[in-house]
Amino acid sequence: MRAKRKEGENGMAKVSPTMCEGPFLKKIILYTIPIALTGMLQLAFNAADLMIVGQFCGSFYVGAVGATSSLTTLFVSLFMGFSVGSGVAVAQSIGAGNDKITEQTVHTAIPLAIVCGVILTGLGIQFSDTLLRWMGTPEQELAYSTLYMKIHFCGTTASLLYNFCAAILRASGDTKSPLLFLTISGITNVGLNTLFVTAFDMNVDGVAWATVLSQYLSAVLVLIALTHRKDACRLTLKNLRFHKEPLKKILRIGLPSGLQTSLFSISNVLIQSSVNSFGSVFLAGNTAANNLGGFVYTSMSAVYQSALNFTGQNYGARKFENIRKISWICLGVVFTLGLVEGAIVTLLGEPLLGIYIKDSPQAVQYGMIRLCYIVLPYFLGGMMEVTTGLLRGMGTSFLPMIISLVGVCGFRVFWIFSVLPLQKTPEMLYISYPISWLFTFSVQYTVFRIVMKKKERQINQRIQ
């Protein structure tokens, strides 16, 4: 799926991006598969932590690690949005055949990732304990959760570097390299997890350090890959600096994207506080089920990446009919994928949860409740994500943020404080997820159709 290059006038290299040429179904599927596998490997970092801790240390430590997930996401997601902005900016400049802007965007994105990573590390280490207390983390898990979270934040610079570079590679059509590098990193992570926990008698600190070291390995590998490219996405270290216009575009697209994910995370932090109130056994079951569901969501998120980058290149090339075809294909793929995977994970829920939890049948039953209410209808969340990707691919990032603020975050906050107290049960807590997904998808798809027609009309008027 690499973009083809050919010589144009005056010997200048031009881009003939395969993302702008149909038929699209096969191309989207082939493009999506490596991204899905890459995302699952990223999730496997945390899964390996939970499985090894659960097997060798007990469900108590599973809960301690799980109590940090929503807070970690809240911190990282804002800055991770800039990687989305970088990918969209690169995809659009490739679609437009503008090598100079592509090169400037690449060399702006990398230092931006480093700056964001350093800021995140400082914030995470400084405020981990305080924020975990605000969330109502059970006292017996607090010390271990704080330790895990502080160590985890030592790897955020590497994590951001990897994700920024991977976004650039995917925007150019290369989804296989990020998968290869994360495979190497993931195998290293599992090996270090086992070594630290079994040989050195560590627990949450061992799995945290294993994850950090693996993240730095993946960052180094993806940086080396960019330095060896032969096109406009090639990274030259001496050229790293902030270019004004590409930086503005990355921030314009990436900031709303990051804010949207952060708003999701805020609602999840509130939900995590509600989860914590049900006690340690429920926390362990919820954590294991959340990790299982993450594999389903991650594969659907790969379709979002496809929608984002295919739309980005075709918008840069001003091919709106292609964008219409891409929208229907991506929505169909994510619906099918989410429905099938959600059903399989839910049907096999008890034995799968048993991989994480060996010492608490009650925790497994609590995990099953989450699978039934959240993972089974996960396809709704996937369709919502795809419409977000379609809008961002056209450079519209503020509108999906506002829609998500109201449809997901606002609704869930309202639910937690108004509906949940009337019947405080896990089922009543979890049902807020699919309702918010369905509402938000309906609004975002309508907005996507309106925005596309408006942009197409504006561009046609300029041509005339």
Image (cartoon, grey):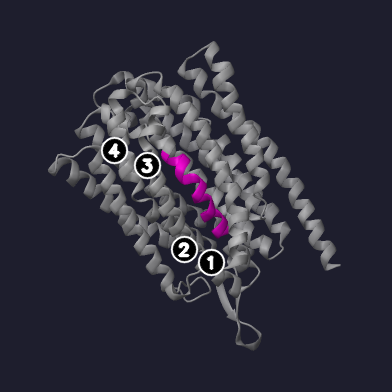
At which x and y percent is residue 231?
51, 75
2 and 1 marks in contact (CB < 8 Å): yes
Q: Determine the CA span between mark 4 and mark 3.
A: 12 Å
- Identify the amino acid type marked 4: Leu
Q: Earlier in the sequence, mark 4 or mark 2?
A: 2
Question: In the picture provided, is 103 more to the left or to the right than 115?
Answer: right
Q: Which residue is the site of mark 3? A: 126
3 and 1 marks in contact (CB < 8 Å): no
Q: Which mark is residue 242?
A: 1
Dividing the picture into quarters, in which one does residue 418 lie?
Answer: top right
Q: Residue at x 43, y 69 (%)?
A: 226
Instruction: Please state which of residues 272 and 460 is positioned toward the viewer in this rendering.
Output: 272
Q: Determine the CA span between mark 1 and mark 4.
A: 35 Å
Q: Earlier in the sequence, mark 3 or mark 1?
A: 3
**Residue 355 appears in the figure:** no
Residue lying furthest bottom: 10
At which x and y percent is residue 100?
59, 75
Question: In the picture provided, is 109 more to the left or to the right than 221?
Answer: right
Q: Earlier in the sequence, mark 4 or mark 3?
A: 3
Q: Which residue is the site of mark 4? A: 147
